Image (spheres, coloured by chain):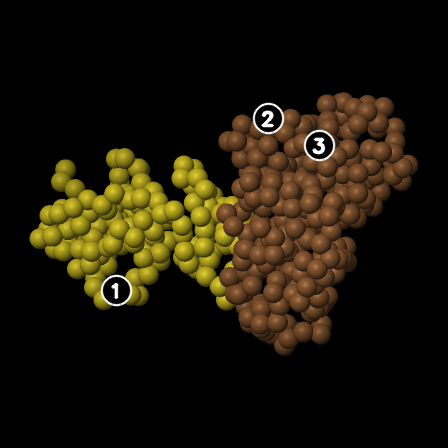
Chain colours: A brown, B yellow
């Protein structure tokens, strides 16, 4: 499917070929930067909910390919406070911009915005639902670290019940020959609907509580933060938050070249003594957001083919 | 002993039979009866050999379209629908689950944009048996038990 004019809303909308197209353009842009690719083009960044790192990554991506940016970081200064609908806000912004990047706390807001907009909308996170550019940069990182996407054992650790990045990456990796390990306490284990989809797609998976037990099998360890805001009961949060804290001693139980990923921010689930090891891929992963987002901006505006 | 006729036969129109009793009124709402001018008879908790208890809806002088019948299948996939002419069954309509369900079902995710802004809901049917539908907007999936109507 052609990317020109297309909105990037959900990883479910991507075929395997679509994923590979984005990754291949990201690789080319990283190797050969194109500082004038988006010259005279404007990207609107509508952050109805603050997200510093995602916004900075998009801004950095656009500025490095020559485009300009307008937008807001919170809704206090916009007409949303006057009761304007999202539909109307988008109908106004699409007159000013060639592409819209939007973060919103309401689930499905990005899909609705894409229906209102005459220009492509890139979803930079809609509540607990989707954050497709994060998933694409996760995939890009896996491909870069391992040189391939097929034949890998991928372990997801931590909050798998609420973790949006985990759900999306699980869907994306299902296009490849993968074995998945879901390591979480029972209360935070992967939702049944995702496991059913894996079964349907013949993707083998293992549910486990003990990380050390399966660490030796994994090529990728995808860590997540146990998010305090997801818990109504603070006692339950305190009980679970420290369950998966990893440090350099974990490497005694893993393959020598295991890559450790994390969508960041981390709290205390990855000890800083891992940061200097070649296995720590999480800061490289954040950096990979730039070429991946450049590729997406270029593709949807028709500047890349 | 002769069975008493609880709900009278209709001369012309549509009969929806074998509705699970508990969803009869929801099926009724789905069909939006305010739009109809003619008589509608509704009965529930009728004895049924097949189902134990069942509901039935008889709509006089109106032939439901295939699309309307398909909507019923969202709540009651096993119903039988007959078109009546001169007190006899002229045609049986086979109920088919639609590929998409537009407008009539409410998303059960309170954080979904369809519950916050004025926008029609839209669901794709991702599994027919058991029924599972996914919201086009928030992507939350729902089973038949979760389905609430607007």
Quick check: can you spot residue B109?
Answer: no
Instruction: Please tell me how crowded label 3 is: few (under 14), some (14-19), or many (20+) other residues with Cα within 10 Å.
Output: few
- Say which residue appears at 52% left-offset and 31% top-offset: A201
Q: Nearer the viewer, mark 3 or mark 1?
A: 3
Q: CA distance from mark 3 to mark 1?
A: 64 Å
Tell me: residue B112, above or below residue B118: above
Q: Are marks 3 and 2 on the same chain?
A: yes
Q: Earlier in the sequence, mark 3 or mark 2?
A: 3
- Say which residue appears at 64% left-offset and 42% top-offset: A24
Which residue is tagged 3? A147
Q: Nearer the viewer, residue B119 or A278?
A: A278
- Say which residue appears at 67% left-offset and 58% top-offset: A37
> What is the chain identity of the residue bearing mark 2?
A
Which residue is tagged 2? A204
Quick check: can you spot residue A57?
Answer: yes
Q: Nearer the viewer, mark 3 or mark 2?
A: 3
> What is the chain identity of the residue bearing mark 3?
A
Tell me: residue A9, above or below residue A115: above
Instruction: Please tell me how crowded label 2 is: few (under 14), some (14-19), or many (20+) other residues with Cα within 10 Å.
Output: some
Q: CA distance from mark 1 to mark 2?
A: 53 Å
Q: Nearer the viewer, residue B130 or A41?
A: A41
Which residue is tagged 1? B36
Tell me: residue A48, above or below residue B8: below
């Amino acid at each position: 499917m052609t990317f020109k004019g297309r909105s990037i809303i959900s990883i479910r909308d991507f075929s395997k070929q679509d994923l590979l197209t984005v990754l291949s353009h990201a690789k080319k842009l990283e190797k050969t930067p194109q500082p004038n690719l988006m010259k005279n083009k404007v990207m609107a960044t509508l952050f109805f909910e603050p997200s510093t790192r995602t916004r900075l990554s998009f801004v950095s991506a656009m500025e490095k390919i020559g485009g300009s940016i307008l937008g807001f970081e919170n809704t206090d200064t916009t007409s949303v406070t006057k009761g304007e609908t999202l539909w109307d806000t988008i109908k106004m912004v699409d007159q000013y911009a060639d592409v819209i990047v939007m973060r919103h706390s309401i689930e499905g807001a990005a899909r609705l915005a894409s229906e209102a907009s005459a220009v492509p909308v890139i979803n930079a996170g809609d509540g607990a639902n989707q954050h497709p550019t994060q998933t694409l940069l996760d995939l890009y990182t896996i491909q870069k670290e391992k040189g391939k996407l097929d034949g890998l054992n991928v372990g997801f650790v931590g909050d798998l019940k609420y973790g949006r990045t985990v759900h999306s990456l699980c869907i994306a990796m299902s296009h490849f020959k993968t074995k998945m390990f879901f390591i979480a306490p029972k209360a935070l284990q992967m939702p049944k609907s995702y496991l059913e989809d894996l079964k349907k797609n013949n993707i083998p998976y293992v549910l486990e509580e003990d990380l050390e037990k399966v660490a030796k099998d994994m090529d990728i360890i995808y860590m997540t933060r146990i998010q305090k805001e997801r818990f109504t009961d603070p006692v339950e949060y305190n009980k679970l938050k420290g369950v998966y804290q990893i440090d350099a001693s974990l490497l005694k139980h893993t393959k020598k070249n295991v890559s450790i990923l994390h969508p960041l921010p981390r709290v205390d689930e990855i000890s800083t003594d891992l940061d200097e090891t070649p296995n720590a891929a999480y800061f490289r992963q954040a950096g990979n957001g730039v070429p991946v987002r450049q590729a997406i901006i270029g593709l949807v505006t028709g500047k890349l083919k | 002993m002769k069975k008493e006729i609880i709900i009278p036969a209709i001369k012309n129109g549509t009969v929806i039979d074998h509705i699970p009793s508990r969803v009869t009124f929801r099926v009724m709402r789905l069909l939006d009866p305010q739009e109809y001018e003619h008589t509608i008879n509704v009965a529930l908790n009728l004895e049924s050999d097949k189902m134990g208890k069942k509901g039935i809806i008889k709509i006089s002088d109106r032939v439901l379209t295939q699309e309307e019948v398909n909507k019923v299948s969202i709540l009651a996939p096993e119903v039988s629908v007959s078109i009546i002419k001169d007190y006899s069954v002229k045609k049986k309509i086979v109920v088919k689950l639609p590929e998409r369900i537009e407008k009539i079902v409410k998303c059960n995710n309170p954080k979904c944009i369809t519950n916050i802004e004025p926008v029609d809901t839209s669901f794709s049917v991702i599994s027919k048996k058991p029924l599972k539908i996914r919201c086009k907007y928030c992507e939350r999936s729902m089973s038949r038990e979760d389905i609430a109507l607007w």
